Amino acid sequence: MTLKPMRIEVDNLTNLSHYLPLLELTTNEKSLVGIYVIHDQKFVFVNQRLADIFGYSQEEMLNIEHMDSVISPLYREIVKIEYQKRLNDIPNEAPHELMIVRKSGETRWVEILGIKTTFNNRPAVAGFLIDIHHRKRLETEREYTRYQLGERVKELTTLYKTGRLVNQEERSTEEILTEIVNILPGGWQYPEITEARISIGQQIFQTKGFKKFEQHQVAQFELPDNLKGEIDVGYKQNMPVEFEGAFLNEERNLINMLAEIIRVYLTRVHERDVLKKSEANLRTIFDHTEVGHLLLNKDFTIVSFNKPFNTGYAEAIGLKVKVGDSLPDLLPEKNRLNALAQMNQVMDSGKVISYETKYLDLSGGEIHFWVTIVPVKNQESEIIGISLSAQDITERKKMEAELADYNIRLEKEVARQTRELQIANQELDTFNYSISHDIRIPLRAIEMFSEVMQGTTELSEKQMEFMAKIDSCADQMKNMISTLLEFARVSKLSLKKEKVDLEMIVKECTETLAVGPLVEINISLKELSVIYADKVLLGQVMMNLLSNAVKYSSKKKKPVIHIEGSERNGFIEVCIKDNGAGFDAKQADQLFQPFSRLHSSSEFEGNGAGLSIVERIISRHGGKVWAKGSKGKGASFFFTLPTS
């Protein structure tokens, strides 16, 4: 709908509708046209459609103090000028498009046509207004789409031209990069003010007006031999910075794609140059390697071979090879069938095959070869022949035989020494047991005579002191004998492994110790795998470690013992941690030596044998035991047991 200029002369709102049949159409609820009368920049009449467009009721519109409040600030001055023109009886040449502000704060496009009228015998402006917001949005979207399409065409054209240039292998790199840098500006939205530069190490290619601009974008790339590349595109004058910045998102993608095209091109050029330089060296390497190489076509006739194959292998087994010969026909009869089978397998499967074979040399001795056969394919992946390499491994085979013989002799020696060690250990355990048993008899005699002396003879104070020392030494001797017997018992016992509930063993030990409520014991051993161990010996391990923890934390106001377990790499690891006396970490290795003590008997009783028994039991189970601690800050004892 388009509004056309017209003339209205009315004295009041009632007469306005009386004189204009069109006004009658536009004041009903179904009208598409809003109509208004403005007097002294205030609405004095609006129809329902106009109120709907502004988002107000008709009554709210008439209560608006000034028409500026519903006009976008961008258009208030224009509306003010046009309003004054209408009052001065200057007619509209055409409807005006402007933006209004609805009650919700939303702005909308409208088309407006005003004419001079009178209200209460005073000049006023009457007019018509239609909502063109949808049309304007479509126009904007269409323009934006057309603009975007034009930009994409420019970008694609730049990419296409660059792609064509880098495929012109007959031209030099300098020519191609010079041409590329001059077509780059055409891919940006302001080509007339765009300059570009391509840097390859110290080499620079740039447009005539290039320099470092405030608004510019850079894409960097890496090339072989640690060479750095960069594309820099900038504007000679600053352009408006919109929500995407001075450059479009697509332009950021464009510069990255161009950088990748140039990177791939220069990498390809580098690889081509390297290949050319290496071709001369390849033949030298091929002829001077220790491995013999042979190239055969599909029917196994010789295409080429290197010097080592001819002089190092073929001549050694009495072969005379030349290009065009059939390799199978040259081989000795006893080797021919196996070689043919291996080569046919490679031709049929397309897979690489390696195998060991042996030939007789001219003197009748054996020569061992390690042969590798690789399929040779064309660009269509069709197998057109095979490459065969042969390496003399005769010396290696001799060394392997000698090493195998040495290993057999070594295993026998280790087995012999192991048997001797086992016998020695058994004899030592027997000797230990016997000595411990036999020494009890004179020890009991010493104790008995001490008792007789003290009971039947008047002794001086000094003599009584000596007798007390004799008793004390006898007690220590008894403890040591008991420990030696315990060592012998632990070593002699055969392990009766069974499924063991570690948490249950710990609880039984804590109940046996009867530590009472003053000692806090925390146990965290759930969700561990089942372990197989000697239940009795494992109980002794836990009892020794727990009794140690209770003993050495007994002087703390609040003794705390933590028992934790974890599982890793096929082993269960258990930790008993206390907050007791601890020990010097430098002396940790002494803890598990028999009769070794880090605290005096006056501080804590004991003979220093408990931990060595723990170490013996855990070792027999295939585990390890160790300790961590520091003086006055407690100790942690760890042991591991295999889960299987």
Image: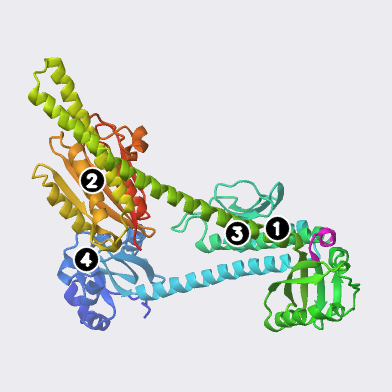
Which numbered circle lies on residue 192?
none
Q: Nearer the viewer, mark 1 or mark 4?
A: 1
Q: Secondary structure at mark 4?
A: strand
**Which sits in the foreground, 181 or 296?**
296
In reply to whether residue 252 is colored magenta, the answer given is no
Q: Earlier in the sequence, mark 1 or mark 4?
A: 4
Q: Nearer the viewer, mark 4 or mark 3?
A: 3
Cα gap from disc 1 to disc 3, whole angstroms: 14 Å
Range of the magenta residues? Answer: 280-292
In reply to whether residue 282 is colored magenta, the answer given is yes
Question: What type is the residue that disc 3 sits on?
Answer: Ile
Cα gap from disc 2 to disc 3, whole angstroms: 43 Å
Q: Secondary structure at mark 2?
A: helix
Q: Earlier in the sequence, mark 4 or mark 2?
A: 4
Please give the residue where the numbered disc 2 appears in the rendered image.
544
- Residue 360 horizontal/vertical position (percent): 82, 70
Q: Relative to residue 578, is residue 641 drawn left or right?
A: right
**Which sits in the foreground, 347 or 92?**
347
**Which sits in the foreground, 245 or 492?**
492
Which numbered circle lies on residue 43?
4
